[in-house]
Image (cartoon, coloured by chain):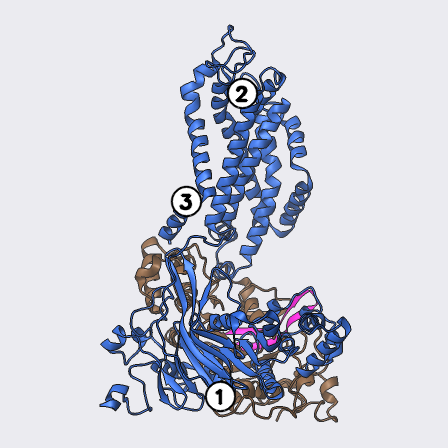
Chain colours: A blue, B brown
Amino acid sequence: MARRRGSAWVAAVRTPVGACSAVLLAVVVLLAVLAPLVWGDGAAAIDTDAIGQGPSGAHPFGTDSLGRDLLLRTLVATRLSIGLAVLATAIGVGTGVVLGTLPSVLPRWAGRLVIAAVDIAVAFPGLLLALFFAVIFGVGTQGAVLAIAFAMAPAFARLVQTLSASVSGRDFVAAARVSGVGRSRLLARHVLPNIGEPLVVNATIGAGSALLAFAGLSFLGIGVQAPDFDWGRLLREGLDGIYVNPVAALAPCGAVVLAGLAFNLVGETVAGVVGVRTRASRRAAGPLPAPRPAAAGEVPDDAVLVVENLQVAFPGPAGWTVPVRGVSFSVRAGEAVGVVGESGSGKSLTALAVSRLIEAPGVVTADRLEFDGKPVDKASDRELGTSLAMVFQDPMTSFNPARRVGRQLAEVSEQHHGLSRRAAFARAIDRLAAVRVPAAARRGRQYPHEFSGGMRQRAMIGMGLMGQPKLVIADEPTTALDVTVQRQVLRLLARTREAEGAAILLISHDIAVVSQTCERMLVMYAGRVVEDLPTGSPPQHPYTRALLATTVDLDTDRGAPLEVIPGRPPEPDQVPAGCAFAARCPLATDRCRDEDPVPAPAAGTHRVACWHPQVSVLSGQSREEGAA
Amino acid sequence: MSALEFDAVSVRYGKLTAVDGVSLTVPSGQVVGLVGESGSGKSTLARAAVGLAPVSGGRVRLGGVDVRKLPRRRPLQMVFQDPYSSLDPRMAIGESITEAMPRDTSRGARRDEVARLLDLVQLDPERATMLPGQLSGGQRQRVALARALAGRPQVLIADEITSALDVSVQGAVLNLVRDVQRRLALSMLFISHNLAVVRYVSDVVAVMYLGRIVEAGPAEQVLTDPRHPYTRDLLAAAPSAHRGLLDDVGGDPLADTEPADPHHPPPGCRYHPRCPIGPLVHTDRTLCVSADPADDAAHRPHHAACHFAA
């Protein structure tokens, strides 16, 4: 993990922004450390022969009213300017963290008081607060540092409060509380480390603002006082002679801009690495891996969906990851096909690829990917929108929470069928009634949050029925629902199929659900279809058999331990050369570990990708033995 | 001595009564399975026992003592549903386990104890220094179990511990939980929406609906001879090799009824708007709408909260 993080930093520094920020930061830090040591004396040297001169060979930026070299003074001022900004930020962030975390340690009433105080302070403009504090703490460096620090603190306190509230709601904090961990330790060990990253990023950006604010205060004469000097003070002095020597004012300006830029860009880079802002990796991961060549299978004449050698790949830092590796199947008109597999087997990605929902940087390739006789990538949005319906696992996130359900359904017909607003809404109500939403006319005017989970899923199916769907793809449509509601939704899908003649592709992790509702079942493992069988016939692939054996049902023997599949599926970027299931398979031989099995017909439409398919329960006869 | 008793426990959040006067006992050394749909209040009941939800009425007692009077480190531990969020992503798993141990454990003893617990949940003790991100879901749930056991609990609450896991991993975790429960003679409250899983693990089964227990009794009896119509519906809806899920499509007037809204529980029997033997089917059964069957549930078999419990 640490190494991965390290390489992410290296990658970040290689981006243009990262490189800029690294160079700028290095220059600023080096100057802050070295400039006063090297040029400190030179910057303080008064030369009465060269008072108020313009740029010259000896003094590139000219001299001030005491004849001191302005280039050296600008360079030497780096330490004080940066140092004070960092100091102010540190005090500000520190105070903010304390104020932000107090509410979770103090008794409830005291915590509320702190929150209210912070809320009021946040409402004050920062610079006004700084001026106010500067007056209270007195004019001078110390006053300015405290002023800027305390002006920053409320915003950070608010940030910490919000972040820690979201972390405190997570289960691991609840778990620690249950195991008797006290409040302070909870805060120190569980909450603060988990909000550290966004805090660091914001503090870095905050330091840039502090630098600017400090320069502002010094410029106004309530910051750094002579004989000390920072960039703000140099700017103030240089401004007097701006018509004589503009460089005297512009040099400190440039320094402030560069240093501010350094802080902000560093913040940006840090944010990119620690993942506060996600940025798609633009690095090319090399050429796409070639899919395994596959013989074109037989395709039934009435196929509504044909998928041949489908591959879905995502670029990663270490090359392509291929979670779907050559999937082939077809769905006939009106057929119900189930796809089962564990999480990570590629079943959902297959469904998304079919409905053209894989977004860049993901890459979909296939020898053939046809819906209703046409290549999917050439189909118009309207064709897909009206004849392909998609039902997702979580219907709460697939509806727009701010619009009425009926209107969202009606939109489909307005967009794709050119119906008027009124006619489209009438059709929406009709469709809601068709999916047996009680009191459809009233419920069509409600918002998604007023629907229960099962009702929302019905409405989602109803949305698919606004057109004439030839295929309904349902991706774990009942996983978030209870058994009684699950049965309702599954029955509704079956009715839809009957009434509309639509084919159904039901994706589920639950082999029992699929075998009860579908005619055919595709079993996926590590990005491949390992078995394609009619639901009635006995499975032959050891993985399918193991999946069936591990399913707990109401007839499971309570006296015996449950069946388990040892090991775990391979990571998508570490799929072995041979059969992906070999490492967990009790029947694996050397051949399985070396050679990748191809799907072979077993009986009728039954296909199985295994070197040792199990023909029946008792005899462990393999394909080779059968042939011999 | 280590029985967990809920005595008329209620939990209210504003106007919502999530748990409404639930009485349930987890006898010492036994497993009580609690089933019900989401929103029925089963997780809230569990959270009330460990102090994560406010008990607004009634009492939770552990071995006869009110849990609120127990010290902060209680002999009552819980395993959460989602192993991806129940472990601190920045804390090595050994440290997470150590944190839950009694304070008086010495440094050396802690290390030995972590190794022993990891071994108990069938994980390599070498993994103690790993972060949760390096483990699979099933392995994380084992760590969560080890952490719960580190508190030397007499009572363990398992809240939907396998619902975030794949079927192939679920079996291993259930086997482990059952094994550990028997070896340590723990009392356990096992919560799940999956009837088959509850049946496999539990000695006693309680069925919850809209904040109330509607039926409870020995597991085998409740599941083979259910008395409350809701229990029967749950059993009928569970996928099973013997019955098709899609049988008797249509015709049933209750097939598309909606679960009741916990914010506005129906009067009388809370199940009557969905009940196949209630007023929607038998129009003469007005009793279901007017009288709460929970009042005299104690006299019926399985304490079934139904006026017409068969």
Of the numbered discs in the image, which one, if any, rests on residue A229?
Answer: 2
Q: Secondary structure at mark 3?
A: helix
Q: Residue at x 57, y 41 (%)?
A: A96
Residue B261 left/right relative to A611: right
In the image, residue A371 above or below residue A558: above
Q: Nearer the viewer, residue A163 or A42?
A: A42
Sequence-first tag of 3 and 2: 3
Distance between the Cα atoms at labels 3 and 1?
A: 54 Å
Label 1: chain letter: A
Circle 3 crowding by C-alpha within 10 Å: few under 14, some 14–19, many from 20: few
Circle 1 crowding by C-alpha within 10 Å: few under 14, some 14–19, many from 20: some
Residue A490 left/right relative to B127: right
Q: Are the numbered discs 3 and 2 placed on the same chain, yes or no?
A: yes
The residue that label 3 is drawn on is A14
Q: Position of residue A224 (x, y in %)?
A: 57, 22
Single out the mark in the foreground, 1 or 2.
Answer: 1
Quadrant of the rendered structure where residue A595 is? bottom left
Quadrant of the rendered structure where residue A623 is? bottom left
**First to last magenta residue range:** B1-26
The residue under label 1 is which amino acid type? Glu
The residue under label 3 is which amino acid type? Arg
Label 2: chain letter: A
- Dominant secondary structure of the residues highlighted in magenta in the image: strand
Of the numbered discs in the image, which one, if any, rests on residue A519?
Answer: 1
Could one spot residue A6 in this view of the protein? yes
Q: Secondary structure at mark 1?
A: loop
Q: Nearer the viewer, residue A471 or A114?
A: A471
The residue under label 2 is which amino acid type? Phe
Distance between the Cα atoms at labels 3 and 2?
A: 36 Å
